[in-house]
Amino acid sequence: MGKLHKHSNSELHSCSFLLILMARKKVDLTFITKTSKRKATFKKRKNGLIKKIGEISILCGIQACAIIYTPDEPEQPEVWPSEEGVESAITRFRSVSELEQSKKMFCQESFLRQRIVKVQEQLKKVRNENRKKEINHLISQYITVGNNLETANIIDLNDISFLADQCLEDITKKIAARKAQMGTQVPENNGGETVTRHGEQARVNHVQVQGPYTDVDAMQNLNWSADIINAAAPNEMLSLDDVNVQSGWLNQYIP
């Protein structure tokens, strides 16, 4: 057993890491202050760890070992499968170069480091989503209440500009994709007859708008009055995804 003491620190960290992986749900990684609970937890997880190592060793035909230092006997570690098996596994591991050892080495420190990076990415994503909702809310207020953009600070203006450009870019891509799906354009028929495109029938209207709202009658049919805007629910959240590229207004306010 004396030879095992030289390998105690690294193996102890590995065992702690494996205990974390065995948990079926998120574990509060804090020291258990209550002695009885701590001992019960140690015994339960130690047995589970040894069981899992035995299973993976038999099922996958691999060489594995475990060194566990118990609280009651800090100078006498518990090993699996045996002292000879542990020495054989450690000797095999140390027979390769340090570069090869580090390639697939995964200790508790590297595990926690990856967890920190993952949590930081999640935090960044949540902050971006919250900021996007704040900007959408600001734009909704400017449209429904009629606030002047001159009252906005430079940070809000920059974020509004960035979000608007992003939404316009997404809309442009969706329009291009829709045109590609539609294929050829529907032939126009001023007589109001039914024409066929890709096996589907469509009725052609007599009214034709030559450009973006160049027909006076067509423009009069669009109700741009403030009453329609004010009739919207004051607390309604309006998304920039509904912005009309040509008019700059929200689609739900256009008949």
Image: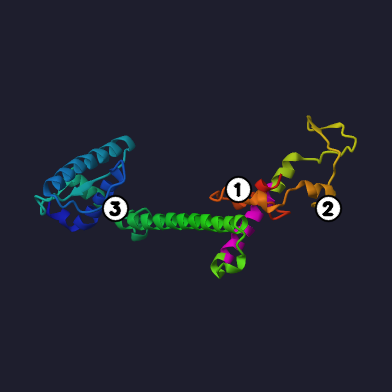
Q: Disc 3 marks which residue?
A: 93
Residue type at the position of mark 3: Phe
Report the span colored magenta: 157-174
Q: Amino acid at mark 1?
A: Ala
State which quadrant residue 109 falls in: bottom left
The answer to whether the residues at label 1 and label 3 have Cβ atoms under 8 Å apart is no
Query: Label 2: which residue?
Result: 214
Q: Which residue is mark 1?
A: 232
Could you tell me how far apart the alpha carbons at marks 3 and 2 are, in whole angstroms?
A: 79 Å
Using the image as rendered, state which of residue 42 and residue 104 is in the foreground.
42
- Farthest residue to the front: give it: 227
Q: Are marks 1 and 2 in contact (CB under 8 Å)?
A: no
Secondary element at tag 3: helix
Say whether residue 124 is left or right of residue 10.
right
Q: Of the numbered discs in the image, which one, if any, rests on residue 8?
A: none
The residue located at (62%, 56%) in the rendering is 143
Residue 167 forms part of the magenta stretch: yes
Of mark 1 and mark 3, the one earlier in the sequence is 3
